[in-house]
Image (spheres, helix red, strand yellow):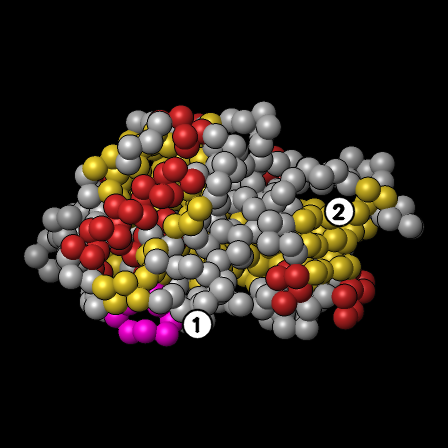
Amino acid sequence: MYFYATLQLGTPAKSFEVIVDTGSTITYVPCAQCGDQCGSHHADAAFDPAGSSTSREIFCGDPRCLCGSPACSCAAQGQCSYVRNYAEQSSSSGNLIQDELQLLGGTSPVVFGCETLETGEIFSQEADGIMGLGNSEVSVINQLAGAAAIEDVFSLCFGGVEGNGALMLGDVPPATFNVELQYTPLVFSAVHPHYYLAHLQNIAVDGAILPVDQGLYDIGYGTVLDSGTTFTYLPSQAYDQFHQHVSDYALSHGLENIPGPDPRYPDSCFGGAPDASHPDQLKEFFPTVDLYFEGTTFSLPPLNYLFMHTRESNAFCIGVFNNGGSGTLLGGITFRDTLIQYDRRNNRVGFGAAPCQEIGTGELVLDPCDPSLIEEARAMLPACESTAAPIPVTTLVEPSPSPGSRPGQEDDVLESEVSNNGTSGSVYTAAAIFSR
């Protein structure tokens, strides 16, 4: 499973579905000259620089010839070229170009990759490319913030098992959606400067802290927040303890072990649970998990660490896997129905439970008389009256396609290398789709 957003590039604008990935830095889409070197299953036609009146080639020596890590190289005609290799053995390479990115209320020039070669999952996936949101001079976020097109903030809101959600570029107040955030500092790493890292201190299952050393979550690359990775990965010792605690709880509450959906993977799965449409009932069979970050605690309901079995009804599997000594990777599953705000101006990241599907489809309404409204949200609405009607939240974009079935677990794309407060901003919908 991955989440994608629709970007509009060029003049006239063309739409491209790109995976939303905080673990990558560069943004790229297939180039017209790629031909059969790029996959035929992509959702949209390739980008043709010759068909855009605002497209500009970038050559070596140009100050815009920036690729982050690994660095740019020079193609045969002197064009600035990039290459990216991913953990699941796929790759993308091509040339950098500059063109206009469509934002709400205008456009802004951005540099992105025009692919001339794809391999592996990048070649076979339905999504056209990747939108790199990592912290690097080449990322779209850095480019837009550097040009003062947006505030140096972006937010992601991934829906639950139904998919859908929203990507918000710029400072969109979470109170707009009646969401209250808890913040933890972003941690800088000189070794991995483009990752979004947080200080994870402990993990608790059903209130019991896993008996591992606190420093375990700092090994390798540390604790990375990576929207481009479907599942979550823990260091071996924490993984063993997590699986044992969750399995013991599930079995002691009446569930039974069953084989996983894919014989290639030794998934830990359990049958006899309620349907996913009743998440509150799942809490009777699976424990709550708490992530203890510096300064705050983030609680995960069962669907934030489980995935649905694709061959058995009322069955779930643990979506947390062994990462050896590489580090801790918190993937998209951990942040289902969660608004995550990457407040880069203040070097912090915020989490808060949110109705992401309703936000993404524009179906969320706020009732001024609702007693559950947080103070900041209430201040944005008219005064409560007995005849007050719910206030619709601004529609973001059209609804997205519904999800399909679960992919293999080696699908992470971690690189191996409307604003209401007067600030600039833009909103895209991120929709869940699946590929194998």
Q: Earlier in the sequence, mark 2 or mark 1?
A: 2
Left of 177 or right of it: where is 237?
right
Image position of 278 with respect to 215: above or below: below
Q: Is residue 178 visible?
A: no
Which residue is drawn at the image coordinates 70% and 54% (left, top)?
92
- The magenta span reads 308-316
Badge 1 density bin: few <14, some 14–19, many ≥20, Cα 10 Å: some
SS assignment at label 2: strand
SS assignment at label 1: loop
- Please name the predominant secondary structure of the magenta segment in the image: loop
Looking at the rendered structure, the kind of residue marked 2 is Tyr
Depth-wise, is mark 2 or mark 1 nearer the camera?
Answer: 1
- Residue assigned mark 2: 82
Query: What is the x, y in percent for residue 16?
Result: 61, 63
Q: Is residue 210 visible?
A: yes
Left of 256 or right of it: where is 358?
right
Query: What is the x, y in percent for residue 422?
Result: 43, 40
Query: What is the x, y in percent for residue 175?
Result: 29, 44
Which residue is drawn at the image coordinates 58% and 31% (left, top)?
193
- Residue assigned mark 1: 404
Q: Is residue 311 magenta?
A: yes
**Foreground: 383 or 122?**
122
Q: Residue furthest left?
A: 386
Looking at the rendered structure, the kind of residue marked 1 is Gly
